[in-house]
């Protein structure tokens, strides 16, 4: 399909997928404008936008308090940013942005590009390693010198590869497969068959953002957990 | 996108086999997750909210395995 080619801009030896970058900036701009509008004049009896933002924050407080523990709230900036950005980015694919024709590629979800999801997964990896080492020093890696501790250490090293890989591939594959499915449904019975497929894609958008965020919280809580 | 005529027959057959086995695994995984959800909620209906959150995460993790197979199938049949 010709949409598989991105609009590539070359700067020196590096190439950038400009359509992914533009839709990513649109998603970021939307979230920043929403954040400013929600926190402009904070009153005790909240207005509509502020009440919505407070309910979102309450959701994150409840989640981190139950899964990480008492000082889990300092991880909320990363976790909430991941969830809100991935949710906005996934839902952008259902908007009729494809009506704007580009020469190569098209304006769909920024998360249908493996580069974006891999970047987010690597950020999560570096973050939980940093938090684990900051909390436990180098005892984060070496628990002891017995046989089971060496096996656990090797499994930890293996998981440093598989966790970001699975995070990136899961989100990328879900969103890309959804777009291919909508395209196929358009080919079969245009205008009517894509509608249930797109409704399913909205559900998949929510679920994938939730899964990415909860796996991040789980990795952070496993890295900073107290030994028994 | 590669032309259908340039993809060998065995590669297209491999694509079909890949997604077939992937779908079997995902179907079993999501079915087991739903079984756990229903058993937990039928014993104790108050935990329905938290249980549904765990179910969704578990189902998405199982679904991801089928999607890895789908990516390989798409690559073998030349679409990605």
Image: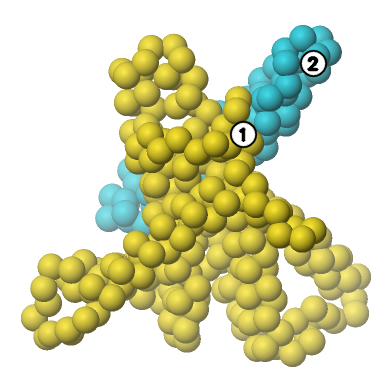
Chain colours: A yellow, B cyan
Q: Nearer the viewer, residue A20 or A88?
A: A20
Where is the C terminus of chain B found, in terms of image quarters?
A: top right
Task: Determine if residue A211 is in view.
Answer: no
> Which element type, helix, strand or loop, lies under badge 2?
loop
Q: Which residue in the structure is indicated by mark 2?
A: B7
Would you identify the image quadrant in which residue A46 lies?
Answer: bottom left
A22 lies above or below A62: above
Residue at the spot 62% in from the left edge and 34% down from the top edge: A4
**Residue A164 has which mark?**
none
Would you identify the image quadrant in which residue A204 lies?
Answer: top left
Residue neighbourhood size for the residue with mark 2, other residues' Cα within 10 Å, grouped as few (<14), some (14–19), many (≥20): few
Residue at the spot 38% in from the left edge and 34% down from the top edge: A99
**Would residue A122 be found to the left or right of residue A102 on screen?**
right
Residue A1 horizontal/vertical position (percent): 60, 25
> Which element type, helix, strand or loop, lies under badge 1?
helix
Q: Give the distance between the C-alpha atoms of the residues marked 2 and 1, in whole angstroms.
A: 17 Å
B58 lies above or below A146: above
Which chain does the residue under circle 1 lie in? A
Q: Nearer the viewer, residue A69 or A41?
A: A41
Residue neighbourhood size for the residue with mark 1, other residues' Cα within 10 Å, grouped as few (<14), some (14–19), many (≥20): some
**Residue A4 has which mark?**
1
Residue at the spot 31% in from the left edge and 72% down from the top edge: A35
């Amino acid at each position: 399909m010709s949409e598989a080619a991105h609009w590539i801009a070359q700067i020196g030896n590096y190439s950038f997928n400009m359509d992914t970058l533009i839709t990513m900036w649109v998603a970021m701009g939307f979230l920043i404008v929403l954040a400013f509008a929600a926190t402009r004049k904070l009153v005790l009896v909240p207005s509509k936008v502020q009440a919505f933002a407070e309910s979102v924050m309450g959701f994150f407080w409840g989640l981190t308090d139950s899964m990480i523990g008492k000082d889990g709230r300092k991880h909320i900036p990363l976790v909430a940013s991941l969830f809100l950005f991935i949710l906005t980015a996934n839902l952008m694919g259902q908007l009729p942005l494809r009506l704007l024709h580009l020469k190569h590629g098209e304006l769909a979800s920024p998360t249908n590009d493996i580069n974006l999801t891999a970047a987010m997964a690597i950020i999560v990896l570096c973050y939980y390693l940093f938090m684990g080492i900051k909390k436990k020093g180098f005892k984060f890696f070496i628990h002891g010198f017995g046989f089971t501790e060496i096996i656990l250490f090797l499994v930890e090293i293996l998981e440093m590869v598989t966790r970001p890989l699975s995070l990136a591939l899961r989100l990328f594959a879900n969103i890309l497969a959804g777009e291919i499915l909508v395209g196929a449904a358009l080919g079969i019975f245009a205008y009517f068959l894509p509608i249930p497929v797109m409704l399913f894609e909205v559900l998949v958008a929510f679920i994938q953002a939730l899964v990415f965020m909860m796996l991040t919280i789980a990795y952070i809580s496993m890295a900073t957990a107290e030994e028994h | 996108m590669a032309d259908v005529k340039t993809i060998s027959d065995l590669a297209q057959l491999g694509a079909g086999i890949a997604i077939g086995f992937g779908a079997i695994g995902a179907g079993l995984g999501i079915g087991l997750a739903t079984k756990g959800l229903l058993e937990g909620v039928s014993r104790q209906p108050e935990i329905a909210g938290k249980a549904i959150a765990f179910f969704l995460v578990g189902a998405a993790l199982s679904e991801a395995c089928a999607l890895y197979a789908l990516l390989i199938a798409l690559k073998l049949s030349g679409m990605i």
